Amino acid sequence: MPPFDVPEGDPFGPHNLPYGVFSPAGSSERTVGVRLGDHVLDAGAAAHALGSPYASLLARPTLNPLLAAGRTAWSDVRRALTAWVTVPAHRETVEPLFHPLSEVTLHLPFEVADYVDFYASENHARNVGRMFRPDAPDSLTPNWKHLPIGYHGRSGTVVVSGTDVVRPSGQRKAPADAAPVFGPSVRLDIEAEVGFVVGVPSELGRPVPLGDYRDHVFGLCLLNDWSARDVQAWEYVPLGPFLGKSFTTSVSAWITPLDALDEARVAPPERTHELLPYLDDAEEEPGGYDLRITVAINGHVVSDPPFSTMYWTAAQQLAHMTVNGASLRTGDLYGSGTVSGPSERERGSLLELTWNGRDPLELPDGKRTFLEDGDVVTLSAWAPGPDGVRVGLGEVTGRVVPAP
């Protein structure tokens, strides 16, 4: 099928146009691409052929120059791309610049600067509290509804979808053990998340207010925050996640621009605590996103976490992580935290789905409490788009391989 002839209702139609970085078949050179159906358009080559003033931003081996260019450039480039793939007058010029998706190599689409991960799902936080603090008067920590809790991760271990995940080794100590032991994690888990990609940097010492969110954040992607629960449990008191998280974080090869998700904007859940002014979004545009996520293990769907239930929004997270004056850099990535809904079928981690290993999952290839070597985890998602069409988010896949 010719690349322009995308079937009606395709979630990667011209209403979407996510950005990635690819190498054509037989080449090692990387360039910016835009997905249309099951093809990839060489965006730099198209921009050059059609005389676009933004050709220098698109004919690059990474998205970072486009990310840094700012909101006006983002909107102009998106309008131009939409015209290039829909206006018949451009067809003869643009059609030879498409590549079948099955024949290209996809790469990490941007150079990651800093990586921050949050803890924004009330359902997830309450589940964790019930598991590990069963006698506490409240399953949430006292600060949880006053600020978006987060931690700084390791940007150098963010990898593109399809990259194998090596089972990490580390110290672990069960409560009944007399002393810690060292070895491969035996409680390897996933966390279904959404990642937000920063384009325009900010000045050191100057917080970014809620209303400036769309001036700094370019787009979003699916993210899998792989987690070694046994390593994490032993190390995280009192400073929080470290080696249990830093070994690998997987992201989609496709970054969906925020402008493609206008129809998916929704109000976040009702606030039950008064927020400090820098987090109070009552007068802001709806800050949530209606993203429907699916988690599959070895092709078997185990969960459908709804992103619309997230208590803290991406705009609030951005405001909070800069309120102390911390600056943003082009390529900063921040994760939403595990996405979990109110029902058992909507939990976004094996920790919750198996209730800390108490209730194994029944899969076609056997029971699971945590991941086994050879398991393949796939996150996929879609959002409501214009006129009832779906906006597809690029999937995130990773296969667990044994520790060396």
Image (cartoon, rainbow, N blue to C red):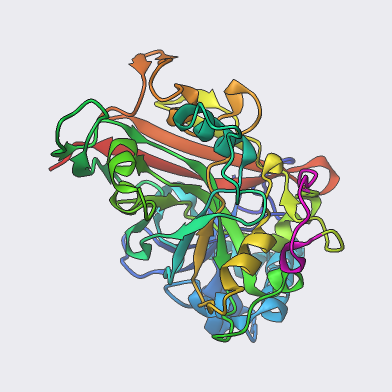
Residue 204 image-quadrant placement: bottom right
Front residue (pair 282, 287) = 282
Identify the image quadrant of the N terminus: top right
Answer with left or right where residue 205 lies relative to residue 400.
right
Q: What stretch is highlighted in magenta?
A: 268-281
Residue 354 image-quadrant placement: top left
Determine whether 197 is above or below 371 in the image.
Answer: below
Residue 348 in sight from this viewpoint: no
Number of marks in picture: 0
Residue at point 79%, 48% (across, down): 266
Percent across and percent down for residue 188 are 32, 35
Front residue (pair 206, 59) = 206
Identify the image quadrant of the C terminus: top left
Answer with left or right where residue 81 lies relative to residue 167.
right
Q: Is residue 273 rendered magenta in the image?
A: yes
Answer with left or right where residue 27 lies relative to residue 302.
left
Residue 401 image-quadrant placement: top left
Percent across and percent down for residue 170 are 19, 44
Q: Is residue 191 rendered magenta in the image?
A: no
Answer with left or right where residue 263 lies relative to residue 356.
right
Percent across and percent down for residue 217 are 63, 68
Determine whether 385 is above or below 372 in the image.
Answer: below
Residue at point 61%, 42% (across, down): 121
Determine whether 33 is above or below 362 in the image.
Answer: below
Residue 240 in sight from this viewpoint: yes
Q: Main secondary structure of the magenta part?
A: loop
Determine whether 180 is above or below 111 in the image.
Answer: above
Residue at point 62%, 84% (across, down): 206
Percent across and percent down for residue 375 are 32, 29
